[in-house]
Every structure is written in C-alpha cells, then in structure tokens.
Image (spheres, grey):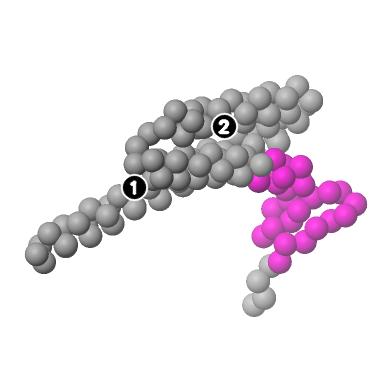
C-alpha cells in the first residue's frame, strides 16, 4: 500500500496531509511559531553554555519571544484569522515543550555519564 503524499491544491490554498486539509496560512503561522520558539531556546541554551551561567540577554530572550508571539497572535485575531492565531501559539508552545524535554534528557545522560565516570575511577 502506497503512503499518502502531501498534495497542494492551488485553487483553494490548502495543504492535504494524510487526508486532513490545512490552510496554507495556518501551516505558515504554525511554522513561524515553531521557528520563534526554536530560535529563542537555542539562543538561551547557547548563551548559557558559552558563559557558564545565566546572562541577562540569555534569560530575557524567552519572555521577549513570548511577547513577539503574543503580538502576532493578537494581530492575527484582529484580522479575523482566529485559526492561524491559535496555531502560531501552538507552534511556539510545541517548540518550548520539546526543547525542555531535550534539556531534561541531556541532563539525565550527563548525570549517568558522571556516575559511570566516578565509578570507574
């Protein structure tokens, strides 16, 4: 059985993936939310690792990105694009949640490595 492929319908500006039709604007705004979240968490993590601790801008980047996404959500809602405004927030939230999960996994693996290293010596 062949896997369903994403098809783009040029007349209705929708993307069909696995039988679910998603508006192109909704997909774009979800990607924007994901991108803002990924950039913010990456910047915060890199600034923490480079300096060995928190920096003012590294700590402030997450609330600043949240304000940016909130502003985009309000502007989309004012333009009567409620679905796209919801998806920009959902994309941002997904990026933050996934980055927190990855950081937890990294800390767990770092702890296991340190325990193994201490046991060997």
Of tags 2 and 1, the one toward the viewer is: 2
* Residue 22, magenta (yes or no): yes
Q: Nearer the viewer, residue 101 or 19?
A: 101
At x 53%, y 39%, the residue is: 40
Q: Nearer the viewer, residue 115 or 11?
A: 115
**Magenta span:** 5-31
Left or right: where does residue 105 sit relative to residue 36? Answer: left
The residue indicated by pointer 1 is 104
Residue 95 x/y as whole percent: 52, 44
At x 34%, y 37%, the residue is: 53
Image quarter of the C terminus: bottom left
Rate crowding at label 1 as few (under 14), some (14 to 19) or many (20 or more) other CA atoms within 10 Å: few
| Figure quadrant of residue 47 | top left
Residue 64 x/y as whole percent: 55, 28
Disc 2 versus disc 1: distance between alpha carbons?
Answer: 21 Å
Residue 27 x/y as whole percent: 70, 46
At x 54%, y 45%, the residue is: 38
| Figure quadrant of residue 83 | top right
- Report the disc number at residue 65: 2
Provide the secondary structure element on which disc 2 rests: helix
């Amino acid at each position: 059985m062949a896997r369903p492929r994403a098809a783009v319908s040029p007349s209705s500006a929708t993307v069909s993936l696995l039988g679910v039709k998603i508006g192109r604007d909704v997909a774009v705004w979800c990607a924007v939310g994901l991108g803002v979240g990924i950039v913010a968490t990456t910047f915060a993590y890199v600034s923490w690792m480079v300096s060995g601790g928190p920096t003012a801008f590294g700590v402030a980047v997450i609330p600043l990105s949240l304000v940016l996404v909130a502003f985009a959500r309000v502007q989309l809602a004012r333009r009567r694009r409620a679905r796209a405004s919801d998806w920009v927030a959902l994309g941002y939230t997904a990026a933050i949640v996934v980055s927190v999960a990855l950081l937890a996994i990294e800390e767990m693996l770092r702890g296991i490595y340190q325990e193994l290293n201490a046991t060997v010596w």
